[in-house]
Image: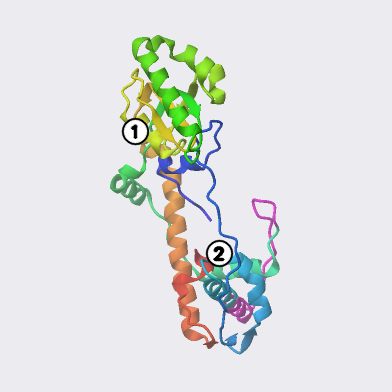
Amino acid sequence: MVTLVIDHAATRADHSHDHPHEHAPLARDTAPSRERVVMSPVSVNGVAISRKAIAAEVQNAPAKTPAEGWFNATLALVVRELLLQEAHRLSLSAEPRLEADGRRETEEEALIRALLAQEVRTPEADEAALRRFYDNNRRRFLSAPLWEAEHILCAARREDAVAFPAARERAQTLATVLARAPERFAELARAQSDCPSAGVGGSLGQIGPGDTTPEFEAALKALTPGVISEPVETRYGVHLIRVNRHVEGRTLPFEAVRDQIAAYLADHVTRAAHAQYIALLIGRADIQGIALGGADSPLVQ
């Protein structure tokens, strides 16, 4: 599957960080649900889909509830069976191929690929269509803004009723010193900052959207280069921040994103065509035990 990431700023939150003001992973609720899943026997043109097979497929069907997971797993198996039956009806054969990630296709995957390649035709976007998409979506084709910044961190967790007020007081004292002598920023960062960046005078290098906590990023956006912030509180402690340089995001030229647009449109058209084809097969089939919508099939997402 091809994924086009046009808004670069939105993707930077996935990058790894070296500084103690980054985002931490969200905790997941792993407690088992007591919800019971009840579904009727499922079949496709008289071929039963076993509950054992559905239970095994559930692990590949992310969902918010067990019932939704069971439905999604059933949906995937029903559509797969429908496509395989059609491939056999057309007497298709296909040699499993090696995927880009090194995994080898199963025979069923190869058959489904051959079926879709033979039966589904998708138009290719011409140069005019690519250019039109670019012109109509220029705001999506932005390079991320960047800040060259440095900071001093007085580390403490917000929930620490003793340490956090102490960190706030220490940061305010440093802010008072820097108000009189801003040229001492690097010196004080080396001596006082609790961030590993202290070793380089508090320098964080280049920072983009999503690289820091929301409070830290808001301060970056509000600061004029050269000005030292008031104490900024985050879940990691209290910061004093100085932006040395700010580079605004710019619209990328068409030539730089042409291939990405072509891949995005091709993938979009292919998904729609596959959904229409599956909907056609569903309309002709005898499917029992589940209400199917071809466009919602996991095989076309």
Would you place residue 274 above or below residue 177 in this image?
A: below
Name the amino acid, label 1. Arg
Q: Can you give x and y, in whole percent of width and height, for residue 191 in the image? A: 53, 15
Its colouring scheme is rainbow
In this rendering, position of residue 152 left or right of residue 82: left
Q: Say if 54 sits above or below 271 in the image.
A: below
Identify the residue at image location x=68%, y=78%. Answer: 52
Residue 162 visible: yes
Q: Residue at coordinates 52% horizontally, 68% vertically from top-left?
A: 298
Whichever of callouts 2 and 1 sits on the residue coming sooner in the sequence is: 2
Residue at image mark 2 = 62
Specify the farthest residue to the front: 162
Q: Which residues are magenta?
A: 81-103
- Left or right placement of residue 104 versus residue 15 in this view: right
Q: Disc 1 designates what residue?
A: 250
Residue 207: image location, x then y, percent: 45, 30
Q: Nearer the viewer, residue 183 or 111?
A: 183
Q: Amino acid at mark 2?
A: Pro
- Assess disc 1: are there few (<14), some (14-19) or many (≥20) residues with their C-alpha within 10 Å of its C-alpha: few
Callout 1: helix, strand or loop?
loop
